[in-house]
Image: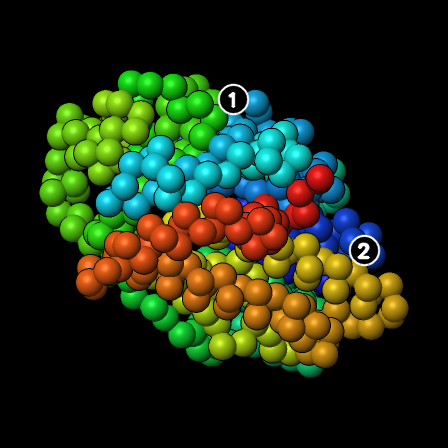
Amino acid sequence: MMQQYDVLVIGGGVVGLATAGLLADASRQLKVIVVDANTKPPREDTRLGLRVSAIANGSIEILERLGAWDRIESERRCAYEHMRVWDSADAADSASALRFDADDFGLPYLGYIVENTAIQRALLHRLNVLGVNVRYGASVESIDREEPQVVVRLSDGETITTDLLVGADGSSSRVRDCVGIDVSRIQYQQTAIVTHLRPEHDHEATAWQRFLPTGPIALLPLSDGRVSTVWSTNEPDNALAADDETLGRLLTEASDAVLGELTVDGPRGSFPLNAHHARNYVTENIVLVGDAAHAVHPLAGQGANLGLQDAAVLALTVGDAVSGGVHPGERRVLRRYERARKGENATMMHALTALNRLFASNLPFSSELRRTGMQLFNVSGPIRERVVERALGSKPVR
């Protein structure tokens, strides 16, 4: 069976759903469908899911524009007002520890830690209101270009013809592979171990991050008093084999007991860490967004935010083209999006790679250089504000 859509988005994660919603909202002329190989997110969970994202102010503005932010249940999101970053050679309250406080930038909070499936559920509601069709349990079998459109054959036997195909299907993008877009990769030789923890002390609406020679550990505040941890390490074997009690002790030690004793209180997972960047984001009728185009080290929690910024820029670009009577899949249209986003994403990827390597360095004087650099950054004024503005995705109010 053949179906015709103006836009086909492959990938029903946060970025894919947001892209579909923003495109549909940018031009009501566009008939949009989302196809995802996975099952539909559950309507309701009694426990907070393992996968959470740090959502910056700029990303919140995007979700508000879609009418999705207020639909995210309060117990599924937790505002953080402070951030502390420190080197393993120092303490969290040392002069060289980086301190970021919302009050310093005229903000009520620096961002939110939000459960991914809660964002998906909110976006699905908005897509339903916007008339966007969403289909689960179907993967891409083949992609063929038949000017001026693309023909996509799905595993469930359906065939969709579309003016614009959006690959939002993650790091192992089937869309990217089918159309032969190469990627450059950086292997970190680290594994990320993720779980939820019950801390001995209150997390104080603070995101904590400690850099160790083996990799960084982050403790992210959750609304029920627990913290979500992402421990990136090049020595994962002991942690992966540990029972909950032993893992709690390892994480307490890795975090320098900044929140006291940590007790494992949730599921756990792990995944190898690498970064990649697509050599091209676009070709005729086809565009990549989010992790399909780029993936960065999780140490700064920027992955979802970069993807949502991709979605916003693409929707603005395509919306302007359609309103001007231009075909949405024209390469010259899509190149405007690529030019706007590719350099920004590459800069973030390389900056995070350099930061990870800097803190892992054991070269002579490296610890002292890091300490001095962090102390200078704390009093750097405009430089510090510019870094925070970029991380937040919007300009702080003064």
Q: Is residue 209 above or below residue 321?
A: above
Q: Tag 1: residue type? A: Glu
Closer to us: 328 or 144: 328
Closer to us: 379 or 169: 379
Q: In which quarter of the image is residue 268?
A: top left
Residue 362 coordinates in the image, percent (x, y)? 20, 59
Q: In which quarter of the image is residue 86?
A: top left
Report helix, strand or loop for mark 1: helix
Closer to us: 107 or 239: 107
Q: In the image, is 53 to the left or to the right of 324?
A: left
Q: Quadrant of the N terminus?
A: bottom right
For the point 17% across and 42% down, the residue is 240
Residue under label 1, please give it. 75
Picture disc at residue 187: none
Q: Tag 2: residue type? A: Ser
Residue 32 coordinates in the image, percent (x, y)? 70, 55
- Alpha carbon distance from label 2 to label 1: 33 Å
Q: Nearer the viewer, mark 2 or mark 1?
A: 1
Residue 341 coordinates in the image, percent (x, y)? 61, 66
Earlier residue among tags 2 and 1 = 2
For the point 16% across and 51% down, the residue is 235
The number of discs equals 2
Q: Quadrant of the C terminus?
A: top right
Q: In the image, is 321 to the left or to the right of 75?
A: right
Closer to us: 67 or 190: 190
Is the residue marked by circle 1 packed among few (<14), some (14-19), or many (20+) residues within 10 Å?
Answer: few
Residue 336 coordinates in the image, percent (x, y)? 70, 72
Q: In the image, is 231 to the left or to the right of 246?
A: right
Residue under label 2, please give it. 27
Q: Can residue 268 be seen in this view?
A: no
